Image (cartoon, rainbow, N blue to C red):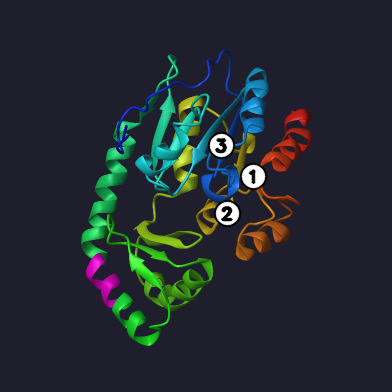
Amino acid sequence: MVVEEGQVLPGRALPFAGECRWLLSLDYDETLRSHDPAQPVPVAFYELMREWRALGVRWGINTGRTLPYLCEELLPTAPFLPDFICTCERYAYVAQADGTLQPLREHNARCHEHNMLVREQVRPFLHAQLGALRAASPELQWIIAPTDPLSVEAADSATMDAIMAFLAPFVAGLEGVCAQRAGRYMRLADARYCKGTALQTVANEWRVPSKNWALLGDGHNDLHAFRLYPEAFCGAPATAHPDVLAWMHEQGKYVSSTPGVMEILHAWHDRVMTER
């Protein structure tokens, strides 16, 4: 079954009784997701989310992936759905009383409208820049994403580093537009929307202040959210991009000694949740 952007997700989140006190936002690729194709999200994580239900924790996946791309991997293996999902660094889906994840239609429609305007305005100029990049650095391996003319997919993260360095002056000159990057992927988007603002939209539904959030991620689109909400608990795995790790160390945020999220989650519990 293909779940398209804007649809209600099949399946249910865990039942939730009482106040939502804590909001946990997790990047998917290279953060929550392991490299086990049979169980991309570790069983131990789901067990911890069951345990933390009584503490008032609701959790969600906050990703640059589209909903179909996320669901094709998550749905066959997940014992239950997250309480919320944010996709494309902007669209939001939130669990209702019956556990179904419903799109926040008004917010999502506004995001879509604004980003379609950016696409129309920016596409010819971006493609001209990419043509100049191809001529200047033919050794770099990249493509324009088939489904989005403002998205670039590079062969690897190092290649995207070089692409971003080339495009930096161009992007800086685009009013109201930002580059949202995750590893070897990058898209230009309306600057009013990012992982952080998507999470704020979810938090407004449950009235959770940002000081009670945990933001976990490894890429530049996560770094964007970290910078917007430094009062939240921010954590990155040991495998995060060097730019992310540098900011985390400068700001005194949590960097794990291992890949994955379990160490970071226990640190959040011990350092923040037990103190309030």
Which residue position is annotated with label 1? 231
Q: In screen coordinates, is 63 left or right of 189?
A: right
Disc 1 or disc 3, which is closer to the eye?
Answer: 3
Q: In screen coordinates, is 107 left or right of 228?
A: left
Residue at coordinates 51% horizontally, 60% vertically from top-left? Answer: 183
- Which element carries disc 1, helix, strand or loop? loop
Q: In screen coordinates, is 233 left or right of 58?
A: right
Structural distance between the alpha carbons of marks 2 and 1: 9 Å
For the C terminus, the image quarter is: top right
Marks 1 and 3 close (CB-CB < 8 Å):
no
Disc 2 or disc 3, which is closer to the eye?
Answer: 3
Tell me: residue 167, above or below residue 102. Answer: below
Structural distance between the alpha carbons of marks 2 and 3: 31 Å
Q: In screen coordinates, is 276 left or right of 125?
A: right
Which residue position is annotated with label 3? 39
Residue at coordinates 32% horizontally, 32% vertically from top-left? Answer: 1
Crowding at mark 2 (Cα within 10 Å: few <14, some 14-19, many 20+): some
Where does the magenta region start and end? 123-128
Q: Is residue 80 magenta?
A: no
- In terms of sequence position, does the residue under pointer 1 or pointer 3 come before the other? 3
Q: Main secondary structure of the magenta part?
A: helix
Residue most extreme to the bottom: 136
- Which element carries disc 3, helix, strand or loop? loop
Crowding at mark 3 (Cα within 10 Å: few <14, some 14-19, many 20+): some
Marks 2 and 1 close (CB-CB < 8 Å):
no
Structural distance between the alpha carbons of marks 1 and 3: 33 Å
- In terms of sequence position, does the residue under pointer 2 or pointer 3 come before the other? 3
Q: In this orientation, which residue lies closer to the viewer: 24 or 211? A: 24
Residue 259 pos. (x, y %): 68, 50
Count of marks placed on residues: 3
Which residue position is annotated with label 2? 227
